[in-house]
Image (spheres, rainbow, N blue to C red):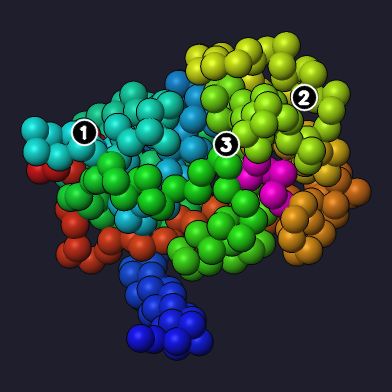
Amino acid sequence: MATPKLLSVFFLHLVAMLVFLDLANAQGLQLGFYKKTCPNAEAIVRKTTAQYISRAPTLAASLLRLHFHDCFVRGCEGSVLLNSTKNNQAEKVAFPNLSLRGYQVIDGVKSAVEKVCPGVVSCADILALVARDAVLMIKGPFWEVPTGRRDGRVSNANEALTNLPPPFANITQLKAMFLGKGLSVKDLVVLSGGHTIGISHCSSFSNRLYNFTGKGDTDPKMDSKYIVNLKSKCKPGDVSTTVEMDPGSFKTFDEDYYTLVAKRRGLLESDAALLDDSETKAYVKLQMATYGSTFLKDFSESMVNMGKMQVLTGMAGEIRKHCALVN
């Protein structure tokens, strides 16, 4: 039987190999990939995305989350967009993905691009570009999106369950999941800042209010006044009510998230967990103290890092005609 030390060494080698393969594929991405084959692609994406966000600004958070959920399962190759088939349950029907929104935006953008450049621009690239443009439209940062991703042909609900960081994850689990994807601890705390926009269902944090250790108690890591406030909105067993992740500015991309976490008002256990590690805690405290002095720049860099995860390039995968269906 292998010793714990040997297993640890094996795990480190495995992670290193996966990271190397990711980097090799990511080298197939480049800025302006469609410059010759579809020169107006990014402009079309931006214009169409703006039409949706102008009507429903809250979609920005949904589209950012959609991109995140795509990248963490099989990489950024559009598998989260695929529908289930008779013989397969796709990622979008997995429990963590049942609340995903924004598919209609991706379909609308894809349709607009296809009218000009049929069969050229992948759904994976469209999702990456839409997430960037949507965040920018609610006062978030701009980041360059290298393109050239191709679309995957496989989508499995079980893989979503095992690869997506759950809202109740502790810091050890979170670090393992991010490092296993080739991301850093800094990427973890920075990308968590995406919770500055959007909403969450009561069911994702109700255990912190009513039954944290199974004894009808509350989470001692959550501010007591915040608990009272949340209990007024979320009753025991409530699975439909939603609460703002960043009360007061959940439609605007800003640094307030870190102030909330520092004051023990992070909504999810995974938010509160950022105070349980020296590196992530230091980042939270820095952003609170300096009014997010580096957050927007850091977020841009981490989004680029995430967008390169396990991408398909070259002749791998395909360019889907319809984002919800393989060709």
Does dot 3 land on a helix, a strand or a loop? helix
Tell whether label 3 touches label 1 (CB within 8 Å). no
Nearest to N terminus: mark 2 or mark 3: 3
Start and end of the magenta stretch?
A: 269-274
Does dot 1 land on a helix, a strand or a loop? loop
- Give the quarter of the image for residue 44: top left
> CA separation, marks 2 and 3?
29 Å
- Which residue lies most toward the right here? 289
Residue identified by numbered label 1: 83
Q: Position of residue 237 (x, y in %)?
A: 54, 16
Q: Amino acid at mark 1?
A: Asn
- Which residue lies most toward the front here? 215
Which residue is rendered at x = 46% and y = 63% of the image?
A: 181
Of residue 265 and residue 237, the one placed in the foreground of this image is 237
Does dot 2 land on a helix, a strand or a loop? helix
Quarter of the image where the C terminus is located: top left
Left or right: 131, with 216 as reference point: left
Residue identified by numbered label 3: 135
Relative vertical location of residue 286 with respect to residue 44 in this rendering, above or below: below
Left or right: 216, with 31 as reference point: right
